[in-house]
Image: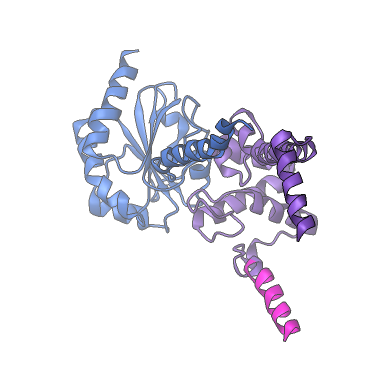
Chain colours: A purple, B blue
Amino acid sequence: MRLVSLIVLALLAVAPVHAFTAPQPDEQMDDAILEARARGLYRDLRCVVCQSQSIDESNAPLAADMRAIVRERLLAGDSDAEVRAWLQTRYGDYVLMSPPVQGNTILLWLFPVLALGGGGVAIIFFLRGQSARADAPLDADEAAELARLRDEEGQA
Amino acid sequence: MNRVFLFVPLAIVAVTLVYFGLGLRQDPSSIPSQMIDRPLPAFDLAGLEDGDPGLSNTDLLGQVSLLNVFGSWCPPCAIEHPMLMQISRSGRVPLYGVDWRDEPGAGAAWLARHGNPYQRVGDDAQGRLAIDLGITGAPETFLVDAEGRVRHHHVGIITEEVWRNTLLPMIEELERS
């Protein structure tokens, strides 16, 4: 039973990747290395009409045109970075699925680190405060209270 | 510990909510154009029918003009069309058309049926020029100055208001300078 559910989970995890891949068989490039680079680039580039899909996932006509351009640039000898830059000059940073690290996105990229670091610092301060309170010597009232409780216990 | 610090998480959440709230007011489908103040890419498109002159980027040199991307398959283009006819009849500014991703003959038949507001039309059946121009849909229109530089990129339908309040003032401004 457990094995079955594991298999089902594994299939569910894998299925969408294949089900939503849009490039058609006739888009396959002859050169296997170029094809692998093209597939990588498809996943990096956003379909500008569908917005939340990459051109690897979208079957919109414009996404197909963009894939054709990626293949054309690769055949012309462009590097992956040059292909991305080619589309970036026409569609802006928007066309990249992951925003580039630059002035207006630095906060976005640093936020997880800042949040984790800030949380860590807060926890350290909190724990220090706790142990500092635990180690402090008893003041007069506390000592008297402790003596009283001890006496009660002794009588019982 | 200083009690003021207890309000720090609340402050962070408040700032984030305001930020997200402002973000919701933006239109996510409008992508800032990269074409502004850049020269049109070089292109030389065939005409829609045999004998049509077609359209190249040099056709737009010499005076302020509008370059309109349309398709016979595009319902908003049909809505926009009467406004383009009106601009064309007024003779205020020359219109050039790019027929984007149409079947052979479909664009010509569409223009024959609805009227042709364009000085020249180029056939972009493969959609190559559209990507060179950073097009995300149709209709889209570029205001091009006399030197062939893009000065304004309008995404969507040119309505009476867009023409009167945006395009016409920019055209007048460009023609003055």
Residue B93 makes an appearance in the image: no
Name the image quarter holding the C terminus of chain B.
Answer: top left
- x and y percentages locating residue A10 in the rendered image: 71, 73
Q: Nearer the viewer, residue B74 or A17?
A: A17
Q: Residue at x 24, y 48 (%)?
A: B115
Which corner quadrant of the image does residue B60 belong to? top left
Above or below: residue B49 compared with residue A111: below
* Residue A12 counted in the magenta span: yes
Q: Residue at x 44, y 40 (%)?
A: B23
Above or below: residue B60 compared with residue A130: above
Residue sitting at the far top: B177
Which corner quadrant of the image does residue B73 belong to? bottom left
Residue sitting at the far bottom: A1
- x and y percentages locating residue A70 in the rendered image: 65, 49
Q: Which residues are magenta?
A: A1-16
Q: How many tags in the picture?
A: 0
- x and y percentages locating residue A75 in the rendered image: 72, 48
* Residue B82 counted in the magenta span: no
Question: What secondary structure prevails in the magenta region?
Answer: helix
Q: Nearer the viewer, residue B16 or B104?
A: B16
Q: Residue at x 53, y 46 (%)?
A: B128
Q: Residue at x 73, y 54 (%)?
A: A152
